[in-house]
Image (spheres, grey):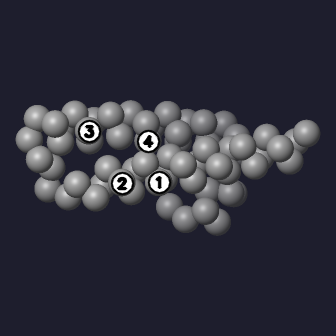
Amino acid sequence: MKYEEISTLSPEELQEKIIAEIENLRKLKFAHAISPIENPMRIRHTKKLIARLKTAQRAQELKLK
């Protein structure tokens, strides 16, 4: 998901997306700890997506103030 797509989401959608991606990251890390996952770069991409989502969320908070 690119930042342009993320910036069009509402604050509620952003929060839901962040929660979903954090849960996805937990599952990926757990699966990788048990046995190596096929593409370990998915963990890095998920972390970066969470960071993008949180950045967009903070930008929206600052716009409202």
* Residue 53 location (% of width, % of height): 58, 48
- Give the quarter of the image for residue 40: bottom left
Which residue has dot 4 on it? 21
Which residue has dot 2 on it? 44
* Separation (CA) of disc 3 from disc 4: 12 Å
Q: Residues within 10 Å of mark 2 (few under 14, many from 20)?
A: few
* Separation (CA) of disc 2 from disc 3: 10 Å
Residue beneath the point at 86% across and 47% down: 63
* Separation (CA) of disc 1 from disc 4: 10 Å
Q: Earlier in the sequence, mark 3 or mark 4?
A: 4
Nearest to the eye among marks 3 and 4: give it.
Answer: 3
Which residue has dot 1 on it? 48
* Residue 11 location (% of width, % of height): 70, 40
Is 55 displayed left or right of 17 in the figure?
right
Q: Earlier in the sequence, mark 1 or mark 4?
A: 4
* Tags 2 and 3 touching, CB below 8 Å: no
For numbered disc 1, what is the local secondary structure? helix
Q: Earlier in the sequence, mark 3 or mark 1?
A: 3
Q: Residues within 10 Å of mark 3 (few under 14, many from 20)?
A: some
Is 30 displayed left or right of 7 in the figure?
left
Q: Residue furthest left?
A: 35
* Tags 2 and 1 touching, CB below 8 Å: yes
Which residue has dot 3 on it? 29
Amino acid type of the residue that numbered disc 1 sits on in the rendered structure: Lys
* Residue 50 location (% of width, % of height): 50, 46
Amino acid type of the residue that numbered disc 4 sits on in the rendered structure: Glu
* Residue 6 location (% of width, % of height): 61, 56
Amino acid type of the residue that numbered disc 3 sits on in the rendered structure: Lys
* Separation (CA) of disc 2 from disc 1: 6 Å
- Give the quarter of the image for residue 45: bottom left
